[in-house]
Amino acid sequence: MEMDFERCYRAVDSRDQRFDGWFYTGVTSTGIYCRPSCPATTPKRRNVRFFPSAAAAQGAGLRACRRCRPDAAPGSPQWDVRADVVGRAMRLIADGVVDRDGVPGLAARLGYTERHLHRMLRAEMGAGPLALARAQRAQTARILIETTGLGMAEIAFAAGFGSVRQFNDTVREVYATAPSKLRAARGRHQAPAGAGTITLRLAYRPPLHARALLDFLSVRALPGVEEVRDGTYHRGLRLPHGAGQVALTPADGHVAATLRLADLRDLAPAVARCRRLLDLDADPVAIDATLAADPALAPAVAAEPGIRVPRAVDGFELAVRAIIGQQVSVTSARTTLTRLLAARDRTDHEVGGPDGDRTPGPPHDQRGEPPGSLRGFPTAEELLGVPDAGFGMPAGRRETVRTLARAVTDGELDLASGGDREETARRLLALPGIGPWTAGYLAMRAFGDPDVLLPTDLAVRRGATALGLPDTSKTLDAYAERWRPWRSYATIRLWRAA
């Protein structure tokens, strides 16, 4: 979205939620910045400036509005789906790469110099990588202040600040109040019980078809890793500093998230991965408008608005799922994966288990995990340690999984959301046993490409038949040109129609 003043001001004047996260409104007369849907009185034109990011507004000396909480707005759909360097950088910053590896680490991941990366981000975001990461740290700090009973020094380092002084200065600058006053303003709301437990709301742009998301995840849920129960999705997480678990419950206007983290420094990455999993930064109104223009899809769009693309918290996990799911049913793939997980657990038991795969929360069993706790999907190193008999699949497919795991372990393949999509696809297709369907499936779900069609997929073709669309690979591929740039969302609708 271009920062056209008239278009932005109209969105603010109408308090249009669809534009939350697209831009931020700075009010020079009050010294605050808001999300477009802020319920406060619309400011006069002469007192308004628009910014492409919260960090840019903070850089202009403005503080976050305490009424609309612009720092908690959904992320911009642009940075969620764009495959260019700025889009990749924004996803990596959200995942905490700057906090862990600094700007040099971010630049190295992207293959650019620090100076050029700073120049690109300043041009599009109005702020450099350090300022963008600082804005995220401030939001993380606010969440920890308001939802936990941790001391301020603990919060400072958990949020990624280098010192307590830096933490205090940033909170005062961004929120115009001391950290202790933010906690006092929490009032009677109590922090949840349990060390490392955090509850928060994940905002999204309505509408959200929650049942479609839960249906998709439920039929593919792997025992011990994830489950859908009573309208809530639970899963184990592997995070940069340790293990975690999350429970996600869709609600009106937000998704309620309860996170249990072994290390609170993982809060920002955990939130970013949960948002990505549920596709919460999408713009469903724009997507549905394009798809509804096709008379064949219009009834489905009207009946089920807000369909999202279920994504992934772990690119390697999804790659393994895609390989095992080649040319077999969802049920068959789930059975094979379940056996593979059981073999991983047996291997862990024999060698003592991975040290970093523990989650907090009493009471604990003899292995140090809560009874019935969920673990993250096996790492590439763990799968390489599983014996042949544990795979339960044809030898060729087993070797494809192992080849993939070796490529990830050796650093030859980057399956993180901030990876280069084209380069990753090229390297994937060079591996034996991986073809266009697998690469396309990963592009859609692991890398967030919004414009992927899987015309050779049997369920996609069955869905096309059910909707009266062309159902051969070539004819469907040609017909789907009218769905650009949202063919991934059309693919999900075809799967549902099947």
Image (spheres, rainbow, N blue to C red):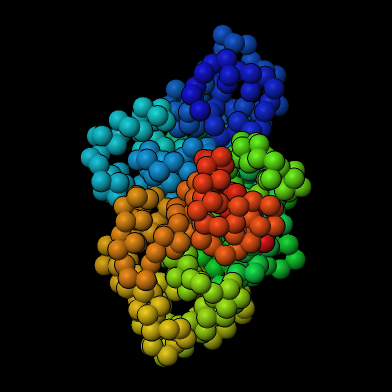
Question: In terms of image quadrants, where is residue 329?
Answer: bottom right
| Residue 132 in sight | yes
The answer to whether residue 366 is above or below residue 400 is below
Q: Is residue 27 left or right of residue 340?
A: right
Q: Residue at x 51, y 50 (%)?
A: 477
Q: Residue, x 39% and y 35% (percent of image)?
A: 131
**Residue in the image at 30% along x and 59% along y:** 427
Is 428 situated left or right of 311 in this image? left
Image x and y of residue 132, in percent:
42, 37
Q: Is residue 466 above or below residue 65?
A: below
Instruction: State left or right for residue 316 relative to residue 33.
Output: left
Mark count: 0
In-front residue for pair 317/305: 305
Residue at position x 52%, y 81% from top? 336
Q: How far across and how far down the image is residue 244, in percent?
A: 52, 65
Would you place residue 40 above or below residue 405 in this image?
Answer: above
Give x and y (percent) for residue 6. 57, 15
Tell which of 483 and 239 is nearer to you.
483
